[in-house]
Amino acid sequence: MNIQYKSTRDDSKLFSASYAIVKGLAEDGGLFMPDQFPSLEMNLDDLAKLDYKGIAYEVMKLFFTDFTEEELKYCIENAYDSKFDTPEIAPLASIEGAYYLELFHGSTIAFKDMALSILPYLMTVSAKKNNINEEIVILTATSGDTGKAALAGFADVPGTRICVFYPKGGVSVIQEKQMVTQVGKNVKVIGIKGNFDDAQTGVKNIFGDKEFNELINAKGFRFSSANSINIGRLIPQVVYYVYSYCTLLKSGKIEEGDPINFVVPTGNFGNILAGFFAQRIGIPVHKLVCASNDNKVLFDFFNTAVYDRNREFILTSSPSMDILISSNLERLIYLSCGQDASKNASLMNDLKTEGKYSLTEDMKKFIDQLFVGGYASTEMVDDRIKEIYDETGYVMDTHTAVASAVYKKYINDTKDDTTSVIVSTASPYKFTRSVLGAIEGKKSEEEDFVLIDRLNAKSKMPIPKAVEEIRNAAVLHDTVCEISEMKSEIGKFLGL
Ligand SMILES: *Cc1c(COP(=O)(O)O)cnc(C)c1O
């Protein structure tokens, strides 16, 4: 099956996977989508005999059909290696009857590593395949974790540069320190005076700015995106859904064909959408539970069929989910209206002009087959972290705790006894202040590394290398700019 890609806003043109990866976002502002869904070629029992890399190949080859076996295996080998602190890559922990899929064993201790450790390889191979000779400039807006994972992935990769924008004051101290200490000859990190949505909109506008793109092309550069809208990030995320199903199968926790639930702490809707793709290619899924924090625009969307971003933006203890425009949701909307690009484009235009749109009844029905929305307040998150720690000794981060709290409420409300996997998206060490505050019942004023050492004593979890590395690292990036200055800062970085 030769999968090709279309924009969610224009279905007249087809593109190869490699072209979609280099491009990031379609010219019309839409997102690339496969023109059809392939199916896993192996049965699940056989797939379960493979390791993470083996499963990664079986999944990615279905979608990246213009890559040769050699090219794809080169990308996979280089991505899922000793950068991860366990050969399992994505281990499952069994805690109080549920399974926690730990996606934080990569180099920056958050789930973004799962895709961003492979994207630079997919991107450089894709550029070669499309005879692109310009230097690729990755522009990224981050709510905290993408930035560092993208920087770590692209630092000193030949033929690339990377520029990351983050909301100054809108990320955790550890997240900021991880970014501003990034080494590499081709990297730039900039704080903006605005929130994540401002950063993301700013980057989208630059991608869509024809004149500026022509200017940088003439100087030998070409923009691309490492944000979760890139199909080169979405597809690698499908792998760990398949892998976790296989892990449960292999250990006899489920039998082939048994449906399972995934509970996913959600922001930009990339992670959970990958779960939907996994279902589409053959993983038996009962429900995909979309867990939101106090910025519960998605919870309201699943309940009312109206997406409405006109609301106060709330800074929570799970900053990587502090988002009011979930970009990847556009892909689900597109599918829910039967891949009708003009219908989707008109809804996205409503979102742009009025800040909201409504689903038709058929679209709502399509989405309700699999998706359920839930949300947890900061207080519920704190209670859940403490409860699980007191009862089991397991420590989870604030984002995972949003999912865990939503899961608890979902089980109480529905009595659903389907095997459930809670997607665990960050190491507790990335959000130590909030996590320790929840466990100790009060926020501490002490310095971050004091808290890290105390969490280590309480949890007996080893301190990850990613945290030790920044303990004494020098700050290398201190640029802060207005939203209106993002373009000129890029100009400076590229020496225009
Ligand atoms: C990015 C992130 C999320 C949200 O994932 P989306 O794909 O944007 O929905 C959740 N938790 C953590 C720790 C993250 O870094």
Image (tube, grey):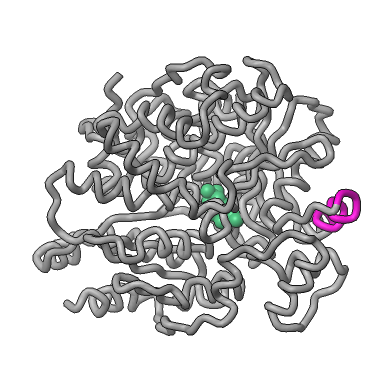
Based on the picture, tell me whether residue 325 belongs to the magenta stretch.
Answer: no
Q: In which quarter of the view is residue 75 placed? A: top left
Q: Nearer the viewer, residue 201 or 21?
A: 21
Magenta residues span 383-392
Q: Nearer the viewer, residue 370 or 24?
A: 24
Q: Which residue corresponds to the image point at 86% horizontal and 69% vertical from the top-left?
A: 440
- Looking at the image, residue 375 sits to the left or right of residue 360; the answer is right
- Looking at the image, residue 489 sits to the left or right of residue 173; the answer is left
Residue 345 sits above or below residue 123 on the image: above
Where residue 12 sits in the image (x, y, percent)? 21, 31
Q: Which residue corresponds to the image point at 53% horizontal and 54% vertical from the top-left?
A: 106
Instruction: Please state, as top left, top right, bottom left or bottom right, where the C terminus lies in the image.
Output: bottom left
Residue 363 sits above or below residue 149 on the image: above
- Quick one: which residue is furthest to the left in this view? 218
Where residue 179 sits in the image (x, y, percent)? 48, 72
- What is the number of callouts on the image? 0
